[in-house]
Image (cartoon, rainbow, N blue to C red):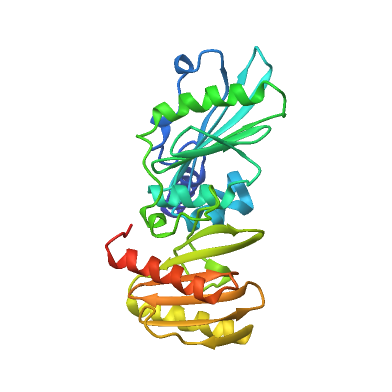
Amino acid sequence: MERRILLLSMLAAVFWAASSPTLCAQATARLVPTAAELPGFKITRAAEYYNAGNLWKYIDGGAPGYLAYGFKEVAAFAVTHPAGQLEFTVDIYDMGDALNAFGIYSTERSPEGTAIDTGSQGYRTENALFFWQDRYYVKIVGDAPVPTMAATSMELAAVVSRKLPPRGAPPKLFAVFPEGGRIRGSERFLARDVLGQQFLHNGYIVEYAKKDAKYRLFLIRAGDARQAQRGFRQYRDFVETNGSIAARPQQLGEEAFTGKASAYGGVVVARQGRYMAGVLGLDDADAARAIVLVMLSKLAGGRED
């Protein structure tokens, strides 16, 4: 009986330690600025650390989205700037690699934000600042949108950025997308549910403008050619069910189709090897086919991530 009680106590202790925000592995602890590195600021809440097992305790319903991007750990702490009576919460998310860090940043990015030169890429709003750098995604959120918030959050972000590895560059596969008409800052990487389809993963999306019209280009990198072929045919069936297939053009990848979908308008999609590329919302089918052909030719030239 005593042995059983002891075993249950040990299991309970292990479970508590694994779920505790302060006792999980603290790989990000070295990235948290010290008081000496934060002149003008006062640390008001020491860093707490959450991993994949207990992230829900910190961001609750937002946890699944982060886990889909390979989330490893987050260090969360709070500071104040006494001179301006400003309070900030700082989160440093370790997303495992640079692609995932960019991915979660890109899905949360606000189109109304003001671009900043911090980290690999970043922006600020009235009371918050966000950037990604290497494998990390940083969120700095203030308690109120006051005039001094922007400058103070930039000062805080600079300190955090200096603690992180060198900046790094956006995912290389975005170089496959054409420059003409590209809407800057519209690049996104979706780990799952690409184009709203549960069977499509690892998608790169960029928005474009032509006169008053907007359209989207996408590139999906499957695990292998067989997986890409299956995804291509499932998506073709989706378009045919929710719109129409106009043609199956030759000499455009290994297989291709053009058509119209109720959600997008004009659609041109092609598969080549493990990749699926397409244009959504551009009614000029010839122009769309030319874009896809250029994207596939760049992939054939070795521009892979």
Kindly indicate the quadrant of the structure image that contains residue 240. Answer: bottom right
The residue positioned farthest toward the left in the image shown: 302
Kindly indicate the quadrant of the structure image that contains residue 209. Answer: bottom right
Query: Percent x, y for residue 82?
Result: 64, 14
- Say if 205 sits above or below 96 in the image: below
The residue located at (43%, 54%) in the rendering is 70
Marker count (numbered): 0
Q: Nearer the viewer, residue 296 or 14?
A: 296
- Say if 144 sits above or below 38 in the image: below
Work out which quarter of the rendered image holds the N terminus and state it. Answer: bottom left
- Say if 279 sits above or below 250 in the image: above
Q: In this view, does 60 lie to the left or right of 298?
A: right
Work out which quarter of the rendered image holds the C terminus and state it. Answer: bottom left
- Say if 294 sits above or below 15 in the image: below
Query: Percent x, y for residue 126?
Result: 68, 33
Query: Percent x, y for residue 99?
Result: 41, 51
Q: Which of 294 and 102 is in front in this view?
A: 294
The residue located at (40%, 85%) in the rendering is 250
Q: Nearer the viewer, residue 249 or 154?
A: 249
The residue located at (48%, 71%) in the rendering is 278
Q: Can residue 40 be seen in this view?
A: yes
The residue located at (55%, 63%) in the rendering is 216
